[in-house]
Image: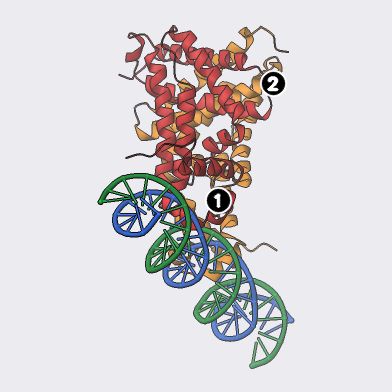
Chain colours: A red, B orange, C green, D blue
DNA sequence: TTCAAATTTGACCAAAAGTCAAGAAGAATG
DNA sequence: CATTCTTCTTGACTTTTGGTCAAATTTGAA
């Protein structure tokens, strides 16, 4: 039996507090006591909802990544290229609105922690998948297509992070740049005839 | 007076131990006592060489990033495109040889820790700078050139990380893909006439 | 040999993660 | 309403781990 009666469940409120703290401080700068204090709660209660500090962090991370994925959900009623453009705009909007959180999200992570890595990989994989969906059947057979798109997702991430520091371009221009780069990358896969396959 | 008599100074050996541990475990999975034990040393001695655990981590990180930058140092005797190709090959070679460390390096980091971020930014910035060096004067004036190249560096990082999981392409093919993408991205900046400047 | 500086230790301290018995608050039952 | 059962909440306690320090050991000039 899940319990989601009130406006916000305690668990949700705690995650919001964590979101705030973790976007402003590194993982081990944030003490359990800080979280408890910020939420007006005893330390023990935090452990009632989350088994360990690390699990709490994962919950916070999952929360924001799933929010990101939701807000950039592709609109399949649009044709692929337009769908991509809209998705990118939504992505940049998220980055802009939750700048601190977004940076912490991508550049954060707790060392080589496999669980954290898994969550971020899942996000990236999802984007790769979405891009693949928008490609015509004929293109999808290219040898290193998936690899190239994964690279492109990294391109978009780095682009957005750099953009946050200095908004020289509009979101529309960013999206255009990203799309052109994607198309060019895919095109270059065709030309790369040499030895693969 | 620096002291670098013997084969390897204690400090260097400690950094190597840290390199090993941090490439296999996350920052806070590695206890000071673990490091001391792995180096056959008392905990106190670690604090003789490094003020805090965090500083130790930074030293390890700086060590491997500077090693990466050294090994990929551009050979200015080559023409720009060839120089880039050789640089990329060296980069992928490093990633392959120090796979675990390399992954920890890029995807690691301690939360939003500004010092860690600064080190990684410095590496990325250096690459952006190197690419810019290889561009003809005429190209360097493009409005969002720096931004686009920063994105491309992210592309190369993501590409290499994905490649490490499944070596489907040769390093040469990877480099070719990366170069084509860079050129295409820059070209697309030209075409993006609209409203900037 | 001697002495001062550099190196190394291990016991100790402080802070932060994690545990738990017990109490308070709700909700269901009679 | 009383009672009882469940859920929620606390604060004191334990354990782990980062960090300190005086003292001991080693090194290397003089």
Give the x, y percent position of residue A52: 43, 53
Q: Quadrant of residue B191?
A: top right
Quarter placement of the N terminus of chain A: top left
Vertical placement of residue B132 versus A27, above or below: above
Q: Residues within 10 Å of mark 1 (few under 14, many from 20)?
A: many
Look at 47% across and 57% down and name the residue there: A44
SS at mark 1?
helix
Q: Are marks 2 and 1 on the same chain?
A: yes
Q: Quadrant of residue B147?
A: top right
Q: For residue A35, which numbered disc appears in the image?
A: 1
| CA–CA distance in space, label 2 to label 1 | 36 Å
> Could you tell me if residue B23 is visible in this image?
no
Which chain's residue wears label 2?
A: A
Which residue is at the front of the view, B75 or B164? Answer: B164
Which chain's residue wears label 1?
A: A
Vertical placement of residue B26 versus A1, above or below: below
Q: Are marks 2 and 1 in contact (CB under 8 Å)?
A: no
SS at mark 2?
loop
Look at 61% across and 26% down and name the residue there: A96
Lower position in the chain sequence, tag 2 or tag 1: 1
Look at 64% across and 28% down and name the residue there: A164
Which residue is at the front of the view, A44 or B63? Answer: A44
> Could you tell me if residue B10 is visible in this image?
yes
Look at 67% across and 15% down and name the residue there: B139
Give the x, y percent position of residue D12: 50, 71
Q: Residues within 10 Å of mark 2 (few under 14, many from 20)?
A: some
Q: Is residue C8 left or right of residue B168?
A: right
Q: For residue B152, which numbered disc appears in the image?
A: none
Q: Which residue is mark 2?
A: A168
Give the x, y percent position of residue B113: 60, 46
Give the x, y percent position of residue B105: 50, 43
């Amino acid at each position: 039996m899940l319990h989601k009666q009130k406006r916000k469940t305690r668990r949700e409120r705690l995650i919001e507090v964590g979101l705030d703290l973790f976007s402003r401080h590194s993982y081990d700068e944030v003490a359990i006591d800080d979280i408890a204090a910020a939420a007006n709660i005893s330390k023990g209660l935090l452990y009632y909802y989350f088994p360990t500090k690390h699990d709490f962090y994962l919950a916070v991370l999952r929360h924001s990544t799933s929010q990101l994925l939701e807000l950039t959900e592709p609109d399949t009623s649009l044709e692929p290229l337009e769908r991509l453009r809209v998705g990118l705009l939504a992505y940049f909007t998220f980055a802009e609105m939750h700048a601190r959180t977004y940076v912490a999200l991508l550049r954060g992570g707790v060392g080589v922690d496999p669980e954290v890595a898994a969550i971020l990989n899942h996000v990236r994989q999802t984007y790769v998948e979405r891009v693949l969906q928008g490609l015509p059947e004929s293109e999808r057979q290219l040898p290193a297509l998936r690899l190239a798109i994964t690279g492109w997702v990294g391109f978009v991430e780095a682009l957005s992070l750099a953009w946050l520091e200095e908004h020289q371009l509009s979101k529309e221009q960013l999206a255009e740049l990203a799309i052109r780069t994607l198309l060019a990358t895919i095109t270059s896969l065709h030309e790369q005839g040499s030895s693969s396959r």
